[in-house]
Image: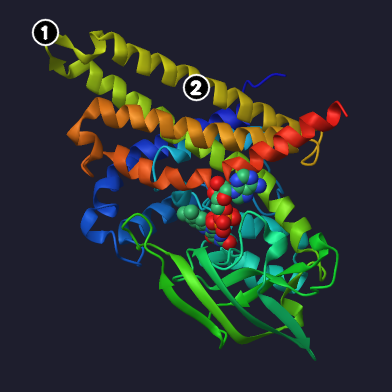
Amino acid sequence: MDFSLSPKTEDLRKRVSAFMDQYVYPAEKEVLAPERAESHEEHPIMKDIRKKAKAEKLWNLFLPDERYGAGLKNHEYAPLCEVMGRSPLGARAFNCMAPDTGNMEILAEFGTEDQKKKWLKPLLDGEMRTCFSMTEPDTPGSDPTQLKTRAVRDGDYYVINGHKWFTSNAIGAAFAVAMVVTDPEAESHRRASQIIVPTDTPGFNLIRPVPVMGHAGGGGHCEIIYKDCRVPITSMLGREGDGFAISQARLGPGRIHHCMRTIGVAERALELMCQRANTRWTHGSYLADKANIQEWIAESRIEIDSCRLMVMNAAWMMDTVGKKEARQQISMIKVMCANMVMRVLDRAIQLYGAAGVSDDFPIARAWRESRALRIADGPDEVHRQTIARRELRKWK
Ligand SMILES: Cc1cc2nc3c(=O)[nH]c(=O)nc-3n(C[C@H](O)[C@H](O)[C@H](O)COP(=O)(O)OP(=O)(O)OC[C@H]3O[C@@H](n4cnc5c(N)ncnc54)[C@H](O)[C@@H]3O)c2cc1C
């Protein structure tokens, strides 16, 4: 295993870092200002940053297919993702933000030519936003075989009825990829399908952005009621019953991206910890000289570097032996990184004292936004259960 960067990746990493220094970090104060917290509009500064990134060809770096993106393998893209993850604005600046990335990946892999023309092309061009609509308030998201939202065939249409929530980024999205039950009698992993639903379709009712830890801005984590929502049968992604297979296809790379961005968040928090510890003087010495602070810093470095190696290993396995064979590693990094970032951020908050919980520094926001990672894309407990079952099977 050799994780040294190829000249192409090293060049991209340097350019993404320089772009972040020049445009992204300096924009944070204004774009993320508390008075904009409930706004659903994209800030003009952000629009301008995206234009610049596109012009510099730092765009769609996540797509492995050269026809659509940078043509990087997972282990090549991962270090870029880490750099982007250092700022809440990073991924969007480069058109590499979830859930659009997942939707682009599945359109590229499973979309028909018409679907690609109508939906993938404007997404690649950065002219559209999208959402992914699977989780329901009345069924456990951690076990999607229990989904209830139904799509019933009626001539050349599917008619969708059901209740979803936590459809992130639905406000301002052009379409949702909805996970719906097309055959309730089928074997559990063939019951569901994924269907493209334009958000202006009658019967796509956006009820509200669910407030999350006191915030409901941006594209929102939205509650949606599908009421007799009719979409043409040509809106189906893949074939009827492919919903779970398509989900698996998007989740592998998506988890590598999430994990590497998380490492970026933790790395920035550690930098901030060190800066503060070196300059804050209390009880006769700098914080940096106190044993407990040194321990927090050392533990954070050990945990961040361990996670990075694990993620790089998972990415390398996906690239060499395939997504299916790398499933154990992907589950492991999902749990490790989501927990690691919370520990590092908690230490950073403690080290900063009152400043740590204020919105004058980026740590509190990072803590709030990272907490969901232990739940979304599979809660910790489900991943641990899966990891344990695979280990146990080896010794049966
Ligand atoms: C900020 C955020 C953004 C999200 N964005 C989206 C989105 O864009 N689209 C979308 O469709 N969904 C989204 N989700 C939803 C997310 O995918 C679900 O929350 C997740 O799948 C868990 O489902 P649930 O919330 O229904 O929890 P449940 O399934 O009810 O589980 C609750 C808890 O039960 C425990 N548990 C569950 N199963 C087991 C088990 N086997 N063993 C032990 N304990 C278990 C776990 O502790 C788990 O956290 C988002 C969630 C958050 C928080």
| Rendering quarter of residue 37 | bottom left
**Label 1 environment density (alpha carbons within 10 Å; few <14, some 14–19, many ≥20):** few
Identity, as a three-letter code, of the amino acid under mark 2: Glu
Q: Is residue 112 left or right of residue 209?
A: right
Residue at image position (74%, 38%) is 327
> How is the structure coloured here?
rainbow
**Residue sitting nearer the eye, 113 or 395:** 395
**Residue sitting nearer the eye, 287 or 67:** 287
**Residue sitting nearer the eye, 121 or 238:** 238
| Rendering quarter of residue 181 | bottom right
- Ligand 1 shows up in the quarter that is bottom right
Q: Please state the horizontal and vertical placement of residue 357, each as a whole percent of the image.
A: 24, 39
- Residue 361, relative to residue 52: is it above or below? above
Q: Are marks 1 and 2 in contact (CB under 8 Å)?
A: no
**Would the CB of label 1 be found within 8 Å of ligand 1?**
no
Examine the rendering and report whether any part of residue 146 can be seen. yes
- Residue 344, relative to residue 227: is it above or below? above
Q: Residue furthest bottom?
A: 155
Quadrant location of the C terminus in the rendered image: top right
Q: Residue furthest front?
A: 396
| Rendering quarter of residue 61 | top right
Q: Which residue is the site of mark 1? A: 284
Q: Please state the horizontal and vertical placement of residue 128, each as a whole percent of the image.
A: 52, 67
Q: Which mark is residue 225?
A: none
Q: Which residue is the site of mark 2? A: 303
Q: Is residue 396 left or right of residue 339?
A: right
Does label 1 or label 2 sit earlier along the sequence? 1
- Residue 369, relative to residue 46: is it above or below? above
Q: Is residue 171 left or right of residue 163?
A: left
Residue at image position (21%, 59%) is 35
Quadrant location of the N terminus in the rendered image: top right
